[in-house]
Amino acid sequence: MRTPDLTEFLTPTKPTGVRCWYQRLDLESDRMENLNAALDIESGITHAKIAEVLNAWGVNIKGNSVGRHRNGLCSCG
């Protein structure tokens, strides 16, 4: 029996044509600085918590979208 080739399913692909939420942000410089620090994986802050704060700032976003950006799976690369 042949082993199926799952490479196509395991290789992440980046979306094309749609800008990432991060590229559309219009935040004050201090908030942007805080967000960039929080987005660093080493910060230990969860995707969900970042989304919660962004929503409080008026940015409609879910943790999954934050995770895609943090893991380089969005159009930002």
Image (tube, grey):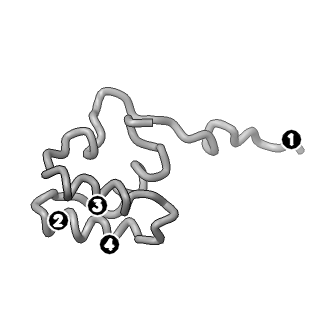
Q: Earlier in the sequence, mark 2 or mark 3?
A: 3
Label 1, residues with CA under 10 Å away: few <14, some 14-19, many ≥20: few
Mark seen at residue 55 = 2
Label 1: which residue? 2
* Residue at position x 34%, y 70% in the image: 48
Q: Give the residue furthest to the left.
A: 58
The nearer-to-camera label among 4 and 3 is: 3
Do the CB atoms of the residues marked 4 and 3 lie less than 8 Å apart?
no
Residue 71, x across and y down, in percent:
49, 51
Please name the amino acid that badge 2 sits on. Answer: Asn
Mark 4 vs 2, N-terminal side: 4
Q: Nearer the viewer, mark 4 or mark 1?
A: 4
Q: Is the residue marked by circle 2 packed among few (<14), some (14-19), or many (20+) residues within 10 Å?
A: few
Residue type indicated by callout 3: Asn
Label 4: how many residues lie within 10 Å, few (<14), some (14-19) or many (20+)? some
Using the image as rendered, state which of residue 9 and residue 36 is in the foreground: 36
- Picture quadrant of residue 47: bottom left
Query: How many angstroms separate mark 4 from mark 2 (CA)?
Result: 10 Å
Residue wearing tag 4: 49
Q: Which residue is mark 3?
A: 34
Q: How many residues crowd around disc 3 within 10 Å: few (fewer than 14), some, or many (20 or more)? A: few
Sequence-wise, which precedes: disc 4 or disc 3?
A: 3
Estimate the spatial distance between the alpha carbons at disc 2 and disc 1, rounded to whole Å.
Answer: 49 Å
